[in-house]
RNA sequence: GGUCAGGUGGCCGAGUGGCUAGGCACCGGUCUGCAAAACCGUGUACGGCGGUUCGAAUCCGCUCCUGACCUCCA
């Protein structure tokens, strides 16, 4: 089941071609470093992508890079954000693009998001965009004014009643009556018309030759052109942030219908916004928190540094369609929850089950696994899937502590549990264990710690607790936690 | 102003008619030399006012509050 923004309800997901999924997600505009709100969206789609792969689908995941075209103001008078930034920094636009793109990739990598199958850029598909403009012109859904091409929304609305606005839930009448203060839009026949191709003044830094003279593409066009090129005229999933729903996605549909006569997308998925102190984070509001700030603890809202995996875990604890408020408390709580999850997974590797029958504990495992999949199948409900996982973690710990004897659990169920939890947590949720010595501390540290623990164990055996506690305290200061168990002590590095 | 989402216990965050979501924090217990971790247990909820129903956090109406979109934004 997938929640489809177009119909506003959950629908059974059946791909166009059995076993294959085409998914397009609107990527970032690369004129500034990514903020954590961007990251939330792409992590959400990363999990959807991973889950589809896990289910065995062949997925073609296309996520674009917008490296041209966004205007800061309405209409033709506005400045291109990218150009503005380039002028401010006295750089070539493509230098800005390069910087922001590399930064974006770094962030996504640190959050362990898989790269998309194709990551096309707008500037790399100028030809396709020009061709699409021509097709829309040919079909009569656009008109030219002074070298710029505008989409004719009125004709579109007339020919396709109840289409325009269907996605964003706007009534076409309301859209047409829009009387917003529109400055310098005299070229357009109607305020709702939008630019497909914009005529460029000579000094404009990014422009290309077209049948209508030198110019550059309108913002909405690239996604239509590139999704059509790589996924076809109709494809399964189109995703993006909720803030793109109108006008971007609405116009995208219009362009596709105008160009090819078919509705391009079968399932629209929109992720909700991330907020800080209850307000949406947005590049234009300048209230961004960067991932780097989170990861280094240098920002104003965090008390300390948080590993990217903790941030990712926190994102998993909320549903992608809910707004999500970022706070220090939430991060601190997530850190503990994440550690508990990772510790549980490690414990699971070590415990044994010797049972052969089918006990209530085996039922609990079976039901737990079933409910994990049930929740993920229900519009990718990671929070609920996590709840089911934590129930199983409790059971794993009970087994480890001897509250449940190993004979009470069937060997096969435990094996199944190992397989499923590892797959869900690592492959689907994309959570990497960064809690232990596994984080690249190397063999030498392992050897040193083994020695230290041995000496401390000796001190404890001699009832020299002062020494034992001193070792533990000093190690804690150094970021290493000691836990004394029945079978000796263990250690872990704080992330 | 128009449109659309929400308001859940100390915090975060699920949940669309009856059955403990979960995480974190708190309290009691077990374990431990002491901790930590873990396990067991207890408590604190569904913005307000009405209504439907045998029964509502969940449906309906009104009301208050918050956010998002309507302009570039993930």
Image (spheres, coloured by chain):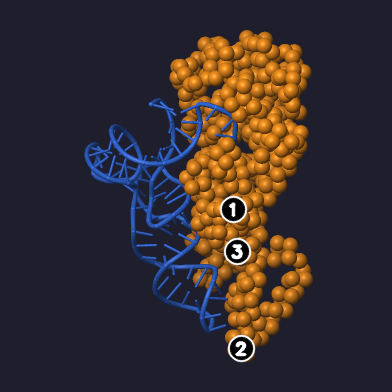
Chain colours: A orange, B blue
Instruction: Work out how far the residue at label 2 is from the one at label 3, CA to CA, in angstroms.
Output: 29 Å
Q: Residue at x 75, y 36 (%)?
A: A91
Pointer 2 or 1: first along the chain: 1
- Residue tagged by mark 2? A464
Q: Can residue A372 be seen in this view?
A: no
Write down the residue under mark 3. A343
Proximity of marks 2 and 3: CB atoms separated by less than 8 Å: no
> How far, Cα to Cα, is label 2 from label 1?
43 Å
Seen at 61% across and 31% down, the residue is A238
Between B8 and B31, the residue placed more toward the observer is B8
Query: First in sequence: mark 1 or mark 3?
Result: 1
Tell me whether marks 1 and 3 sit on the same chain.
Answer: yes
Q: B18 or A235: which is nearer to us?
A: A235
Q: Are marks 1 and 3 in contact (CB under 8 Å)?
A: no
In the displayed structure, does residue A208 sit left or right of residue B3? right
Q: What's the residue at 63%, 65% (across, down)?
A: A494
Q: Is mark 3 on a helix, strand or loop?
A: helix
Q: Distance between the residues labelled 1 and 3?
A: 29 Å
Is there any visible trace of residue A395 in the rendered image?
yes
Callout 2: residue from which chain? A
Q: Quick one: A43 or A173, which is closer to the camera?
A: A173
Q: Name the front one of labels 1 and 3.
A: 1
Q: Which disc is residue A299 wearing?
A: 1
Question: Which numbered disc, 2 or 3, marks the residue that appears first in the sequence?
Answer: 3
* Vertical placement of residue A177 versus A12, above or below: above
**Residue visible at 69% across and 43% down in the picture:** A104
The answer for which chain carries disc 3 is A
Q: For numbered disc 2, what is the local secondary structure?
A: loop
């Amino acid at each position: 089941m997938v929640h489809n923004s177009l119909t506003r309800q959950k629908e059974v997901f059946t791909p166009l071609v059995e076993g294959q999924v085409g998914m397009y997600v609107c990527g970032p505009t690369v004129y500034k470093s990514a903020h954590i709100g961007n990251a939330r969206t792409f992590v959400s789609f990363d999990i959807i992508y991973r889950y589809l792969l896990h289910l065995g689908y062949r997925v073609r995941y296309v996520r674009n890079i917008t490296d041209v075209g966004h205007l800061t103001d309405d209409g033709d008078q506005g400045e291109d954000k990218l150009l503005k930034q380039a002028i401010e920094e006295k750089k070539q636009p493509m230098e800005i693009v390069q910087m922001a793109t590399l930064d974006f990739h770094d962030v996504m990598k640190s959050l362990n998001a898989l790269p998309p199958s194709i990551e096309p850029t707008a500037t790399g598909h100028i030809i396709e965009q020009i061709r699409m403009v021509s097709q829309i012109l040919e079909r009569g859904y656009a008109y030219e004014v002074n070298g710029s091409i505008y989409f004719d929304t009125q004709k579109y609305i007339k020919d396709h009643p109840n289409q325009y606005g269907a996605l964003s839930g706007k009534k076409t009448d309301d859209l047409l009556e829009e009387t917003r203060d529109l400055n310098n839009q005299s070229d357009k026949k109607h305020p709702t018309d939008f630019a497909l191709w914009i005529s460029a003044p000579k000094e404009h830094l990014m422009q290309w030759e077209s049948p209508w003279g030198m110019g550059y593409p309108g913002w909405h066009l690239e996604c239509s052109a590139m999704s059509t090129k790589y996924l076809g005229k109709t494809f399964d999933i189109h995703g993006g942030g909720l803030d793109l729903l109108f006008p971007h996605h609405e116009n995208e549909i219009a362009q596709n219908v105008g160009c090819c006569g078919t509705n391009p997308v079968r399932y629209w998925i929109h992720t909700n916004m991330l907020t800080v102190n209850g307000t949406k984070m947005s590049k234009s509001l300048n209230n961004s928190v960067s991932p780097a700030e989170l990861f280094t603890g240098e920002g104003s809202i965090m008390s300390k540094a948080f590993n990217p995996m903790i941030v990712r875990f926190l994102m998993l604890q909320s549903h992608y369609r809910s707004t999500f408020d970022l706070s220090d408390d939430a991060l601190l709580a997530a850190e503990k929850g994440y550690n508990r999850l990772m510790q549980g997974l490690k414990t699971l590797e070590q415990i044994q089950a010797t049972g052969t029958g089918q006990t209530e504990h085996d039922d609990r495992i079976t039901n737990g696994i079933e409910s994990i999949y049930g929740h993920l199948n229900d519009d990718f409900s990671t929070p609920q899937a996590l709840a089911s996982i934590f129930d199983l973690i409790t059971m794993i710990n009970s087994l480890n502590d001897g509250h449940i004897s190993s004979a009470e659990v069937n060997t096969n169920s435990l094996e199944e549990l190992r397989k499923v939890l590892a797959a869900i947590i690592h492959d689907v949720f994309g959570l990497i264990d960064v809690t232990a010595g596994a984080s690249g501390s190397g063999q030498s540290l392992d050897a040193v710690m083994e020695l230290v623990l041995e000496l401390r164990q000796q001190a404890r055996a001699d009832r020299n607790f002062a020494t034992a506690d001193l070792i533990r305290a000093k190690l804690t200061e150094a970021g290493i936690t000691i836990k004394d168990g029945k079978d000796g002590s263990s250690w872990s590095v704080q992330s």
